[in-house]
Amino acid sequence: MAVLGASASASEIPVAVAPVLSASVDLAITGMRSEKGNVLVCLSTNPDYFPDCTKDKKARKLKVAAAQAGTIKINGVKPGTYAVALIHDENANGKMDLRLFLPREGFGFSRNPKIGMGPPKFKSAQFNLGSADVHHAVQMKYIL
């Protein structure tokens, strides 16, 4: 005797998968004093590692040739609260060079916070990213 009716196994039940939301962070960089070296970019969510994110394992880090760094696009960024720190590494040694505790190379931050004694806090450079792309104009600054 046959049983009429439909039954579906668990593998046949359609499951709605939520899409992974991501957006891009576009940086328009101005005020670079030369095209020498690289621009080091750090996109971080962690105030404890800002602006020096060398030990931040979750930060997005990029190195872009300074000659091509007018616009930098960081794709596939998940929603959250971020801050960006930039270094114009003119001698391409992979770090910010200092002289008497002052930066010898250029630097910039998202939202262009005012610079006082020392680097800005995460909060002054932070921005929220949802599913829409975010655009920031970053003015490079040089002390020496």
Image (spheres, helix red, strand yellow):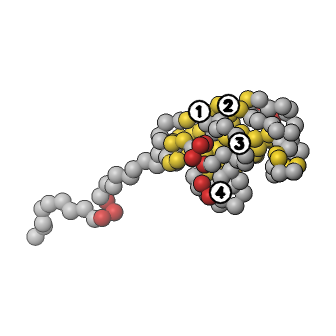
Within 10 angstroms of label 3, few (less than 14), some, or many (20 or more) residues? few
Q: Nearer the viewer, mark 3 or mark 1?
A: 3
Instruction: Tell me how far mark 4 sits from mark 1, CA to CA.
Output: 23 Å
Report which quarter residue 54 is drawn in.
Answer: bottom right
70 sits to left or right of 80: right
Within 10 angstroms of label 2, few (less than 14), some, or many (20 or more) residues? some
The label on residue 96 is: none
Which tag, 4 or 3, sits closer to the chain's start?
Answer: 4
72 sits to left or right of 132: right
Which type of secondary structure does the marked residue at label 2 adopt?
A: strand
Q: Nearer the viewer, mark 4 or mark 1?
A: 4
Which tag, 1 or 2, sits closer to the chain's start?
Answer: 2
Q: Closest to the observer: 12 or 89?
A: 89
Q: Amino acid at mark 3?
A: Gly
Q: Identify the residue at horizontal 10%, vertical 70% (top origin).
A: 1
Q: Identify the residue at horizontal 83%, vertical 42% (top origin).
A: 105
Callout 3–callout 2 Cβ contact below 8 Å = no
Callout 1–callout 2 Cβ contact below 8 Å = yes
The label on residue 49 is: 4
Callout 3–callout 1 Cβ contact below 8 Å = no
The spot of residue 13 in percent (x, y) is 29, 58
Q: Is residue 52 above or below residue 91?
A: below
Q: Nearer the viewer, mark 4 or mark 3?
A: 3
Q: Amino acid at mark 1?
A: His
Which type of secondary structure does the marked residue at label 3 adopt?
A: loop
Within 10 angstroms of label 4, few (less than 14), some, or many (20 or more) residues? some
Instruction: Tell me how far mark 1 sits from mark 2, CA to CA.
Output: 8 Å
The label on residue 135 is: 1
Instruction: Tell me how far mark 4 sits from mark 3, CA to CA.
Output: 19 Å
Residue at image mark 2: 28
